[in-house]
Image (spheres, rainbow, N blue to C red):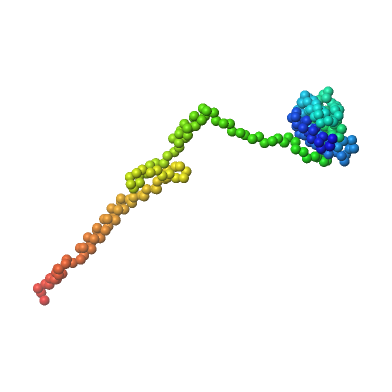
């Protein structure tokens, strides 16, 4: 089997049992015994054994000889020898301690790991009860919507005007009236000025009175 197909079969077997942190390294330049090293993590002894068994069954189903396994007794670190590829199934603490990525991780292999098809949500059809309640909900929504105040037009009919946001338009600010004291003061000054002007003018058609002279010369 081609090494690319074999590594795909192994990764699929690991993903079937929810393996964590799957990595694949190309080791052709490091060892003549195998071409790939695959490392994966399991959270417990039971899961690591299940991962090793899943890889073994996947390789056998692909037509390859049954792989050999080591370390299934304790389940902390299980090695599955698939010929051209060697799989290391380890628990997180053991994997962090030995850190095989430093030894075999010169050339990581890019693969689609954990890729799932996007889930498409389909809206369920409404039930007969929901269809009967739909007109009532629409009427209730219309009644709850804010309404603009009525405004009398020139012909006497009432019209409604509202702003684009649905709220009634704001009223213009009222003009402030002038203070009463200022008006009274202005009127009083004007009337007094008129009286002074009329008293200073001579009466119409009258001559100014002659000055009285004394009888002595």
Can you name the residue that lies furthest to the right here?
A: 32
Q: Residue at left 40%, top 43%?
A: 160
Quadrant position of the C terminus in the picture: bottom left
Report the front residue among 138 and 63.
Answer: 63
Specify the quadrant of the image occupied by residue 57: top right
Q: Residue at left 81%, top 37%?
A: 4
Q: Residue at left 11%, top 72%?
A: 214
Is 167 above or below relative to 13?
below
Q: Position of residue 105 (x, y in %)?
A: 82, 38
Q: Position of residue 213 (x, y in %)?
A: 12, 72
Report the front residue among 125 and 204.
Answer: 125
Q: Is residue 136 left or right of residue 61?
A: left
Specify the quadrant of the image occupied by residue 66: top right
Can you name the residue that lies furthest to the left here?
A: 215
Report the front residue among 44 and 148.
Answer: 148
Can you name the residue that lies furthest to the top here?
A: 73
Is 143 above or below relative to 194?
above
Specify the quadrant of the image occupied by residue 11: top right
Q: Is residue 56 left or right of residue 199?
A: right
Quadrant position of the N terminus in the picture: top right
Q: Position of residue 13 (x, y in %)?
A: 78, 30
Is residue 41 at all visible to an observer of this figure?
no
Report the front residue among 132 and 217.
Answer: 132
Is residue 5 at all visible to an observer of this figure?
yes
Can you name the residue that lies furthest to the bottom here?
A: 217
């Amino acid at each position: 089997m081609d090494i690319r197909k074999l590594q795909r079969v192994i990764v699929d077997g690991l993903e079937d049992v929810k393996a964590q942190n799957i990595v694949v390294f190309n080791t052709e330049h490091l060892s003549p015994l195998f071409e790939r090293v695959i490392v994966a993590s399991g959270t417990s002894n039971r899961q690591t054994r299940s991962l090793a068994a899943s890889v073994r069954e996947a390789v056998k189903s692909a037509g390859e000889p049954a792989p050999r396994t080591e370390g299934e007794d304790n389940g902390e670190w299980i090695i599955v020898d698939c010929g051209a590829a060697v799989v290391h199934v380890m628990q997180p603490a053991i994997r962090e301690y030995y850190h095989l990525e430093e030894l075999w991780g010169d050339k990581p292999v890019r693969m689609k790991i954990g890729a799932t098809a996007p889930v498409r949500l389909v809206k369920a059809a409404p039930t007969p009860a929901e269809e009967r309640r739909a007109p009532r909900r629409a009427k209730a929504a219309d009644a709850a919507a804010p309404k603009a105040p009525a405004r009398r037009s020139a012909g006497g009919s009432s019209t409604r005007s509202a702003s684009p946001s649905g709220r009634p338009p704001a009223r213009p600010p009222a003009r402030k009236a002038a203070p009463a004291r200022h008006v009274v003061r202005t009127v009083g000054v004007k009337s007094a000025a008129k009286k002074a002007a009329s008293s200073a003018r001579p009466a119409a058609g009258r001559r100014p009175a002659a000055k009285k002279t004394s009888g002595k010369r």
